[in-house]
Amino acid sequence: MDKNIIEVEGKSLDMVEAEFLNIRQSTVRSAEGGHIELQQVGALSIDGERIEATQGAAVLIRGSNLSLNQSIGIVAAGETTNLNFSFSPVSVSTGHADINRSAVGVIAAKEINSNNSTSILMIGNNINGNVTTLLDWKSALAIGAVAGGIFGLFSMFKKS
């Protein structure tokens, strides 16, 4: 087996680094590589060029091309992000994001394509598809104004 290819199944690992990683039914603290495939994996940090996760969970996922299928990524950052039946509280893409029947807290991308997905706040140049958002720009502005007014009121009481 080549040193640049690592396949792991059913283990608990601290740090794994290789050009190609295939990890199944394991826990990993940190994974770094070129192409990373995860199946039923719990991880703290994943960093790679191309990341494909199926039924996994990770705190930080960072890479050029992210694909999450039935997975949870607390913070997902990449150039291209694909979420399919997944959940991500924070998702940031420099290019485009495709979300299919997924839930996202805050998503920011140049182009967002959505198919029956939900989000709290969606920021993008082009947003296409069927999406349900909790906040649009008007309600976000209203919430900011109310929060600023409450903060100003408490600041006045604090000084006296």
Image (cartoon, rainbow, N blue to C red):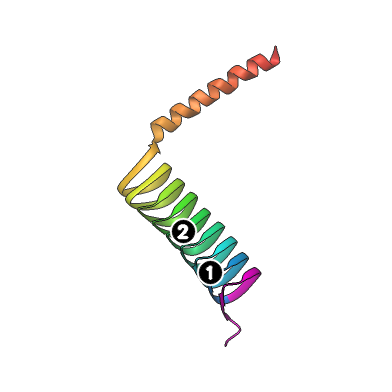
Image spot of residue 154 (x, y percent): 62, 19
Whether 10 is among the magenta residues is yes
Q: Residue at x 46, y 58 (%)?
A: 71
Q: Nearer the viewer, mark 1 or mark 2?
A: 1
Residue bearing mark 2: 71
Give the prevailing secondary structure in the magenta stretch. strand
Q: Which residue is mark 1?
A: 25
Q: Amino acid at mark 1?
A: Gln
x then y, percent, for residue 24: 52, 71
User: From which residue to which does the magenta span run?
Assistant: 1-18
Dot 1: few (<14), some (14–19), or many (≥20) neighbours within 10 Å?
A: some
Measuring from the top left, give residue 54's x and y in whole percent. 45, 65
Counting other residues with Cα less than 10 Å from the Cα at mark 2, is it few (<14), some (14-19), or many (20 or more)?
many
Disc 1 from disc 2: Cα separation = 13 Å
Q: Residue at x 42, y 44 (%)?
A: 123
Decide: is 76 above or below 143: below
Under tag 1, what secondary structure?
loop
Which residue sits furthest left? Answer: 129
Q: Quadrant of residue 138?
A: top left
Amino acid type of the residue tagged 2 in the rendering: Ser
Pointers 1 and 2 in contact (CB under 8 A)? no
